Image (tube, helix red, strand yellow):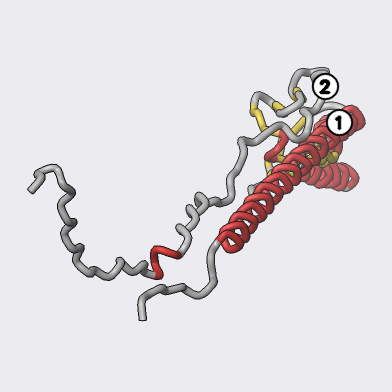
Amino acid sequence: MNPFEAQPTADQPNVAPEQLSGASLLPAPPESPPATGPTYAPATELVPELPPLPEVKSDDGRVLITDTSVTVQGREFLLRELERADVAHVRWILWFLLGGLGLAFVMIVYLQNGLRTGPAMLGMALTGLLLAYGHRGTNRLRLHRLGREVVNFALPGETPPWQRLTAELNRRIFRVHDHAARQAAAELAAADEAMRLAAQQAAEAAAAGDSSGFTGPAVFEGRE
């Protein structure tokens, strides 16, 4: 026998082909989008800063008003902590009453011949000075603070100059509060817009994930 003759091939075992499972036919699940949430950008300057104003000072130096604060007799207050200010002329009630009652008493005693002319004139002069001093009084400056007690100051001199200074102080107080309100409104609007955009992005990502998913029935192949 020729050793180079082709040898008969061995019979292959009758093995059924490997069946494909339905899981292998399903498409690979899409990668889940990264979780998104409301993101906040750093605060930006939405409202421009107020232009600077010159300092205003009283003639005697007791009151100094700047862009952000007011100093009264060495005590400083921020304009943002003040609600308003007012000034009014008030009388010294104690001296006014003492002067009036003393003058009336001296005149009554003098008319009843209880005092001589010299002592009576001296008494009327002293009580008249007390009456005039109490009537002149002083100017009371009231600073109304937000949520706190009112602070009072006594300012000498005529009332009209202090009224003009108080009007300027109120104008600057309202100016600062108006700017703070506009700044807060702008920041709130920016935060709402950021949250709206974040919610919109999350909804779009969820919709994209749902549309790329496979919802058809599983297919199985096998031999009968």
Using the image as rendered, state which of residue 176 and residue 128 is in the foreground.
176
Dot in front, 1 or 2 = 2
What residue is disc 2 on? 53
In screen coordinates, is 150 left or right of 13?
A: right
In screen coordinates, is 122 left or right of 71?
A: right
Using the image as rendered, state which of residue 206 and residue 124 is in the foreground.
206
Quadrant location, the C terminus: bottom left
Secondary structure type for disc 1: helix
Q: Quadrant of residue 22?
A: bottom left
Determine crowd level at label 2: few under 14, some 14-19, many 20+ residues with C-alpha closer than 10 A. few
Residue drawn 18% across and 63% down? 11
Where is residue 91? Give x, y as percent.
Answer: 82, 41
Q: Relative to 157, is 33 above or below?
A: below
Residue drawn 16% across and 47% down? 5
Where is residue 145? Give x, y as percent.
Answer: 69, 44
Using the image as rendered, state which of residue 1 and residue 204 is in the foreground.
1
- Furthest toward the bottom, the residue is 224
What residue is disc 1 on? 168
Kindly identify the amino acid type of the residue bearing the numbered disc 1: Glu
Confirm whether residue 82 shows in the render. yes
Determine crowd level at label 1: few under 14, some 14-19, many 20+ residues with C-alpha closer than 10 A. some
Where is residue 54? Give x, y as percent.
Answer: 82, 18
Kindly identify the amino acid type of the residue bearing the numbered disc 2: Leu
Choose the circle earlier in sequence order: 1 or 2. 2
